[in-house]
Amino acid sequence: MSPNPEWVKKLVVASPQGSELLATERASSNLDVDQLAEYLFGKNELETRERVLKVLTADPVFDKSQNYFQGREARIEASLAKAKRLRQLQVEHNWSQDEYLVANDLLSEPTPYGLHASMFLKTLRDQGTPEQHKLFLERAEQYKIIGCYAQTELGHGSNVRGLETTATWNQSDKTFVLHSPHLTSSKWWIGSLGKVANHAVVMAQLVIDGKRFGPHPFVVQIRDLKTHEPLENVHVGDIGPKFGYNTMDNGFLLLNQVKVPHVNMLARFSRVDPQSGRYQRPSNPSAVYGTLTWVRSNIVLQSGSVLARGVTIATRYCAVRRQFQDLDAKGNVGENQVINYTMVQYRLLPLLAATFALHFTGRSMINMYEEAQKRMAAGQDAGQLSDANRRPGPEEINPGTDLLADLHATSCALKAYGSTVAGEGLEVCRRACGGHGYSSFSGIGTWFADYLPTLTWEGDNYMLTQQVCRYLLKTARAVLAGTAGDNDTSRSFKAFLARRDTGAAFDILTSDKDLVDAFAWRVAYLTFEALQHRDADKQSWNSLLVDFHRLSTAHAQYMVVKSFYDALAAESAPGSLDRQTTGVLHKLFRLFALHTLEREASEFFSSSATTVRQIQLSRKAVMKLLEEVRPHAVRLADSWSFPDWQLDSSLGRYDGNVYEDLFHRASELNPLNKVVFDPYPDNNIILKKDNRTKSKL
Amino acid sequence: MSPNPEWVKKLVVASPQGSELLATERASSNLDVDQLAEYLFGKNELETRERVLKVLTADPVFDKSQNYFQGREARIEASLAKAKRLRQLQVEHNWSQDEYLVANDLLSEPTPYGLHASMFLKTLRDQGTPEQHKLFLERAEQYKIIGCYAQTELGHGSNVRGLETTATWNQSDKTFVLHSPHLTSSKWWIGSLGKVANHAVVMAQLVIDGKRFGPHPFVVQIRDLKTHEPLENVHVGDIGPKFGYNTMDNGFLLLNQVKVPHVNMLARFSRVDPQSGRYQRPSNPSAVYGTLTWVRSNIVLQSGSVLARGVTIATRYCAVRRQFQDLDAKGNVGENQVINYTMVQYRLLPLLAATFALHFTGRSMINMYEEAQKRMAAGQDAGQLSDANRRPGPEEINPGTDLLADLHATSCALKAYGSTVAGEGLEVCRRACGGHGYSSFSGIGTWFADYLPTLTWEGDNYMLTQQVCRYLLKTARAVLAGTAGDNDTSRSFKAFLARRDTGAAFDILTSDKDLVDAFAWRVAYLTFEALQHRDADKQSWNSLLVDFHRLSTAHAQYMVVKSFYDALAAESAPGSLDRQTTGVLHKLFRLFALHTLEREASEFFSSSATTVRQIQLSRKAVMKLLEEVRPHAVRLADSWSFPDWQLDSSLGRYDGNVYEDLFHRASELNPLNKVVFDPYPDNNIILKKDNRTKSKL
């Protein structure tokens, strides 16, 4: 749009300026932001971010100024252009996979290449034979073919075993026939399939001589490599607009008796012998399902920074926004910063604490995963990793001692909890910004909407809790039977049984360790209560689902509190932090733990982990901690080191020039202000495209 | 798009069909849907809906098929076209205001006429003199001028007293000069201002001889009535895209020394005497602030049906969607309807109960408001209605006896609670639909996003709780001083004080009345605890905000439980319902009350309203009630009587043909499937517009 009129350009924000307020905030805390940032991410990652950011911001393809204004078609076209440019830059600058991912993070929007670059390549790599790597993976890595991973169907998401698509082995010509028997068997929600993929890894029920062998992966070409038109007997397209994620071409796919050669069934683990036509069982079934555990572990790792984006924006804006005088203030002291109100602190600061809690939890989750991978590579514990979305068989997971079973349950519990805290926390942040939080320019809404699927995919957050409880019940049974190995869960169960009758009496208000133990005690109590219901009272599985959800959440909260505690206790880590910073992190640890305990109060004293009095005192303690953390809030947010370009938020600007930016975007960037509407009901011409208006408005 | 290929057209949904499943659901309950619908809305309203619906669906202007696909510009243009047509139809069919509102409800999207038809007309009517009615109101009612209500500013939302815009009285030529001194004084978020309004009621600080008299309403013309260009020294436009509500042109407005005649200050209550230039105090200040109470009462009334839309969609879809076998099922019994899982019931059915609870509460809220209006018209209790968003003075509200103070507090508490339950409940409904809930075609996402501002505007839901507590504390003081009149609140406070030391011992599990009393007891306990903190311990107001929010929520929950109880107890009402229906409603009452009690457990026994054991038993009772309500779920949803056209949801279709509709919208209506993208990174031409593809895809 044309610039504002002269008299408008002269207008300034009523003092104090946002920049002054944030400067004061930063001056009032001596927390070392750079030191903390380095502790969180390491020097290398921070440097990589800066280097990659320079490249992106210098490139017009990545201009964000119209993102919030564009409709879906424009958005997805722009997003594909960005994805292509990102790939070109990866080649140009010879970026590692990590650097490529950093670039994607900074871009902060799903692109149509998303599933090609992740699940398609990963599946070919993990489940393909060397021959198949040569045939598919190499071309895919060079983007000569673009692919996706087609598992979910219109009628089946969670229940993979219920997939309807069939792949029937044809001994005569040694081919598989891929077929969609019903409308509900249409592949659905498949990222990168809607517009860009010309190949798909299709999960289909393997059928040999009329016998079913369960879902297996098949590589299927779906579009012409030149014209990019769908091939014969292939019906493929984009599934339409969504609540968010609209820069991704989630697609549908129907196959009508489509023939593929024997080599197109990914055969690293299970295969059909082309000569005999006999099915050969997985050599190592565990790895088949390892992928989802890997995906979940990454969701846990990301949940902290996902939430931190919203917290950064809300914290900065609540320090800039002033509303009302303090009711007890004497005389005209001017309006109070919103962040000074305890009701705002109570909503925002525990989430600030949660960002760090989840970050440290994610780190330990990833370490645990890598450890498990080593052991699996060493051939141990085969067959333990299972897909949380399959209908689970009772014998699936071994008790206690098994690191992989532990990993599986942990990844399920933490994925469900972490993504829920992050997703719901973002909406709390948005509302804490008042009316302006609702503007797209707040930068929270789109981010929230794009993140929400994470609560449903890779194991619905409610579904997953059943897996967790199955593991906890098995561990409890093993502990009672004396067959349990020595891992954290069985240890805390034994400790609970030992003191069950004498009671707990944790000193949660002065001892950090007791605070952690109180969370462990609650988990043990709920587990043995559930075990009683299931094994002794013979209650149906279905009748216990609500209890199971509570139990799984309790287990996740325990693990998060413990991870935060361990991170601060660990010798190595905080060594790099000065006492001041460690002190603030310690307050955040207690704030997160006590605030969680207070919110789950009833379970803590019905399990007699705490007394009612202790709950009331923890409420007081929480209010005290809010007061102590508040002066460091802005600097703590700063330590997450989000560049303004990534946040793309008027409210979250580092410099605090919130209102100037809101006004600029609305008055000068908003295309709707280039046109004039006729307002009268009887005039049906509603739009006057008028050149004068361009210069006028 | 062109039709699907022949082989696709032949595909059907894997049996059982959704239609069969919903038919079975409806057959398995003998709840009389028509009878209940009539009880909820009355014969007249239901008939009006049907009549108006026929008119709308017959008119091409109201076609919804592209709503979910259009970008913002297309959406708002279409929405203005609908608004205009709606106005034309109102004249054609000589619709009453109620019929016009029914039409708007059925349309179910905010339109650019929204604020003209509500706040602009209402403000002119309520606050204008007969002379001003002639001058402004009449033309506005005939849509010869289009207006809006401009109060909120870029820098001031909640705190109306902090508004920066000034209106300075000029004795010499008897005019007011409207001026925006800072960028932050720009009017912001003003509905209907961005594109369509040519007049605005501007709330500005009245200044006479340098003395300020607080915010007052001024009628200001902002755009030319012919060219619709902004007038000189007026900078006006649309504020840009939002999380939702994008069919509304929320706008900004800056005024540079704009002169308006004396008659443009709405002067029914306060005025400037043109001769002396002296300010004349409001004759009846109460009415000045009555508008917001009226708005809040309507929000309470609507919250039930707002939530019911999401519940209807989720309930129907969860009855159609099948996933996994029951884990304890023997043999292959096929997949289980999602609604049979207790974890789904636990999320959905209490919300189903809440829709009715909020509906009955809204009814009694409106009755209370109308009663208060009568008394105010009779000149009683003047000066009691106050704007919850003003910084409240301590003396503002009188204790106990005052119906208007009661009304004010009730409207604040219920607006905050009702809109929060509805808004957050919609997201629970969306997630209960699994992956497909995320598709725009679920019909929940847009509805949720459009509703969210309700939690912030007309008194932020957190802010409002302070008003409620101020009233409760005053009432408590009056009760202690023996000066309290006889209203429900003071009665329950007296009852609490009488039994405070002997204890409560409510029989919540068998007596409905005791259940209601337990909620009242909790409110009284929290009130006198807060009073202790404020009056005896002299704690700062700010330090008590979190407690106040808890207290206000407790008060609202009590009123909702009581309203539901009264609605069923009332002789008249359920007389029109058979025992079966009344019985089901009674289960919903207990489900809502006990589920709420269970979730707020810690407050119920820290106030010793219940024992820990009773809480555990209420959990069991809730699970039992879920089982008993479940067979009636679909029919209960049906009784809300939403036509498919209004829901515009694939998942919520009355006939259960969910998957057919999802597929149709994605494959045949989705414009993105008319174009072909080039997928390769090195080819920068990303879009091929190709005619063949139109016929091909």
Image (spheres, coloured by chain):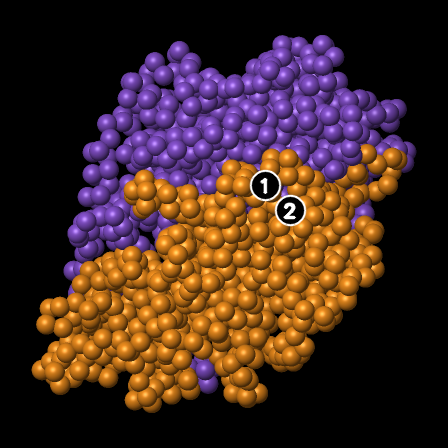
Chain colours: A purple, B orange
- Please name the residue shown 68% across and 77% down the image: B43
At label 2, the amino acid type is Ile
Quadrant in which residue A152 is drawn: top right
Q: Position of residue A51 (x, y in %)?
A: 34, 30
Q: Position of residue B600 (x, y in %)?
A: 55, 42
- Label 1 lies in what chain? B
User: Would you place residue B191 above or below residue B22 in this image?
Assistant: below
Quadrant in which residue A655 is drawn: top left
Q: Indicate left or right for B432 with A80 as reference.
A: right
Q: Indicate left or right for B351 with B121 as reference.
A: right
Farthest residue in the right direction? A209
Contact check, label 2 and label 1, Cβ < 8 Å = yes
Whether residue B257 is visible: no
Q: Residues within 10 Å of mark 1 (few under 14, many from 20)?
A: many
Report the quarter where the C terminus of chain B lies. bottom right
- Please name the residue shown 65% across and 45% down the image: B507
Write down the residue under mark 1. B610
**Front in this rendered view, residue A663 or A630:** A630
Q: Indicate left or right for B365 with B595 as reference.
A: left
- Label 2 lies in what chain? B
Whether residue B80 is visible: yes
At label 1, the amino acid type is Thr
Count of numbered circles on the image: 2
- Give the CA separation, mark 2 to mark 1: 8 Å
Write down the residue under mark 2. B508
- Please name the residue shown 66% across and 32% down the image: A548
Q: Position of residue B542 (x, y in %)?
A: 32, 45
